[in-house]
Amino acid sequence: MNRGLFITFEGGEGAGKSTQMARLAESLRAAGRDVLITREPGGSPGAEAVRHVLLSGAAETMGPAMEAVLFAAARSDHVEQVIRPAVNAGQIVLCDRFFDSTRVYQGVTGNLSPDFIAALEQVTVNGMTPDLTIILDLDPAVGLARAASRRGKEVPDRFEKETLEIHRRRRQAFLDIAAAEPGRCVVIDANRSPTAVASAVSAAVDRVIARAARISARPAGGAT
């Protein structure tokens, strides 16, 4: 592939995104692929500077609109400084959260206008839409328990501390996105062993890699 791929991982707290990204990266590298792992908020120097402000809750008092704007500023830097150059260089970029999280966290449960979220998205993403979005689906009660176990004695972050009902709304919002964009999104049951989940993730990624290879093999101006 001359152009790489952009794959995002989405889902609620404790769904296993970091674990599955690491396993996928290991598998892809073993197959000879050049892989970059990144995350949001963060992933670039400018975006990392905003990460603490967002996750600490320092921006919470400013309201969801300001949070969305801060996420957008971080995302714009992340896209232009890291994601787009890596994909253009032929790398497979794996990103822990992207614009779907803003749609869900600030849009749906922050009660922001879809038009406002869409306008921010258009400017900050600037055409860098994921080739594949893997949504790890898990009962929020299970996910929050996992997150608490992983966190230990550390204080919950800005989003982990919210009510179970809010997390349930977020789960449904991710499922609604997947239903609306089946060509981009794949929902994977995360309430299984890490190995079983990793197998499903790999199968979804293999299909996207095969599709990209078919597209790149077509003659210029040939039939689609």
Image: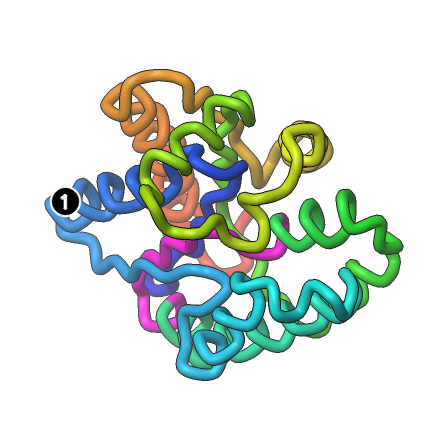
> Does any portion of residue 11 appear in the rendered image?
yes
Q: Which residue lies at the image location 33% right of the left edge and 72% below the top edge?
A: 89
Residues in magenta, as a range: 87-100
Q: Nearer the viewer, residue 151 or 168?
A: 151
Q: Nearer the viewer, residue 90 or 165?
A: 165
Is 20 situated left or right of 180 in this image? Answer: left
Q: Which quadrant, please, contains the N terminus?
A: bottom left
Residue 195 included in the magenta stretch of the image: no
Q: Which residue lies at the image location 37% right of the left edge and 53% below the top edge?
A: 94
Q: Which residue lies at the image location 36% right of the left edge and 70% below the top edge?
A: 86
> Does any portion of residue 121 appear in the rendered image?
no
Q: Nearer the viewer, residue 79 or 182?
A: 79
Q: Position of residue 101 (x, y in %)?
A: 61, 50
Q: Position of residue 139 (x, y in %)?
A: 54, 21
Q: Number of numbered discs present?
A: 1
Q: Which residue lies at the image location 51% right of the left edge and 42% below the top edge?
A: 10
Asked if residue 30 is positioned above or below residue 47 in the image, the reply reads above
Is 20 situated left or right of 87 in this image? Answer: left
Q: Which quadrant, please, contains the C terminus?
A: top right
- Amino acid type of disc 1? Ala
Q: Position of residue 207 (x, y in %)?
A: 39, 33
Q: Position of residue 217 (x, y in %)?
A: 37, 51
Q: Nearer the viewer, residue 12 or 182?
A: 12
Colouring scheme, one of rainbow, by chain, secondary structure, one colour: rainbow
Q: Quadrant of residue 73?
A: bottom right
Q: Quadrant of residue 197?
A: top left
Asked if residue 44 is positioned above or below residue 17 in the image, the reply reads below
- Going by the picture, which residue comes out furthest to the front? 153
Dot 1 lies on which element?
loop
Number of other residues with Cα within 10 Å of mark 1, as a class: few under 14, some 14 to 19, many 20 or more: few
Q: Which residue is mark 1?
A: 31
